Image (cartoon, rainbow, N blue to C red):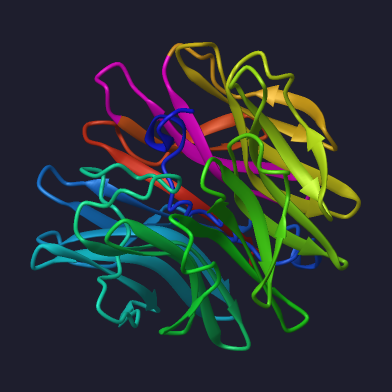
Amino acid sequence: MRNLFSTTLLLLVAVSIFLFVSCSKDDDDNGQSKKPPVIYIAGYVDNGTNDVARYWKNDTVIKLAGEDRTTLAASIFVSGNDVYVAGREFIGGRFIAKYWKNGIEYELESGSTNAHIASKAETVDATSGASPSTSSTYVFSIFVSDTNAYLAGRETTGTKSVAKYWKNKKGVVLSDAASNYAAATSIVVYNGDIYASGIESNGACNVPKYWKNGGATSLTDGKYDGIAYALTVSRGDVYVTGYECNEAGKQVAKYWKNGVAVSLTDGTNDASAHPIFISGNDVYVAGYETNETKASIKYWKNGKLVATLTDGKREAYVYSMYVYNNDVYIVGYEYNEAGNRVAKYWKNGVETELTDGTTDAYAGCITILPGK
């Protein structure tokens, strides 16, 4: 199985959102305004010295920290007039996970461990228990319900990693502490219930699963490696995206509806499903499929391939999507000829570059509000 950095930059991810991913609300919020929508996208840009967390509000760039600080934004959620962004900062040799609410920083609570989202200098890997320090926490996704911020990730101590979520700043462990590795990759609150997707090792393979109020549901039998990247709940149905490896060791892009798998690719090439969005009765999923050497961004509607957004000449990955007034927005990045990641989004297949490609950048989460 590939290192996740070569197949997806989280965060994770985020997300996101999520991841996100949990970067958006339920499909019931899908706007019908005829005015131009307000588009929010979270990510970061390398200024040549540091990664700098930011988000884009249409054409306006909002920085969340100073240029002299190493920060990253992984997931975004807009509730009313409040903008929440999950991310991290590198301080004193360690990474501190936090979220910003309208630009005000809040650090996540941790015990003896340090909370963080990995920088581009690290392996951004939701499927590896390795960490750059003896203890760390990754945060991939944020969701807001009743003014409470919920964040999904993992906390690693030594060689063990547990899946966790935080309600505001307080952490809750989801996985078995005896397990060698687990991670929560996305989080959603629906009718007061807390859902999180992720993985947990069974000792031989990583098993994709989701938790509802702490109770785990495995999505595969654990015979082959897999992961659950993103989750959403619509009309009481639980949808989860990710992949499961086949007998040949190839990753098959899938989504699960209430635990029943729908395969999006045939297993010839490595592939994975990441963001999902439910609009009415339609299920939209975005992801990637390799051509043995490079990954191309694709999206599906109701299990059928709609479009391939990149030509496969240069590596490209997708992290978030949103369907608004029947327009499909997809967020990710594509490498340019100089080898830098260019943050982009596609609207109905037409790309818009968020950065100029002179340095690395990352766009990982989108949400859209009706125009006013």
Measuring from the top left, give residue 160's x and y in whole percent: 37, 59
Q: Quadrant of the C terminus?
A: bottom right
Observer-nearest residue: 173 or 359?
173
Residue 65: name its quadrant. Answer: bottom left
Against 230, residue 312 (above or below) is: above
- The answer to whether 117 appears left or right of 285 in the picture is left
Answer whether residue 333 is magenta in the image: yes
What residue do we see at 51% from left, 47% from top? 203
User: From where the camera sits, is residue 197 visible?
Assistant: yes
What residue do we see at 60% from left, 61% from top? 22
What residue do we see at 48% from left, 70% from top? 164
- The answer to whether 73 appears left or right of 167 in the picture is left
Measuring from the top left, give residue 120's x and y in whole percent: 26, 44
User: From where the camera sits, is residue 31 visible?
Assistant: no
Residue 347: name its quadrant. Answer: top right
What residue do we see at 43% from left, 22% from top? 315
Against 72, residue 224 (above or below) is: above
- The answer to whether 109 appears left or right of 145 in the picture is left
Segment tinted magenta in the rendering: 314-340
Against 106, residue 72 (above or below) is: above
Measuring from the top left, give residue 328's x and y in whole percent: 69, 42
- Classified by dominant secondary structure, the portion drawn in magenta counts as strand
Answer whether residue 33 is magenta in the image: no
- The answer to whether 73 appears left or right of 214 in the picture is left
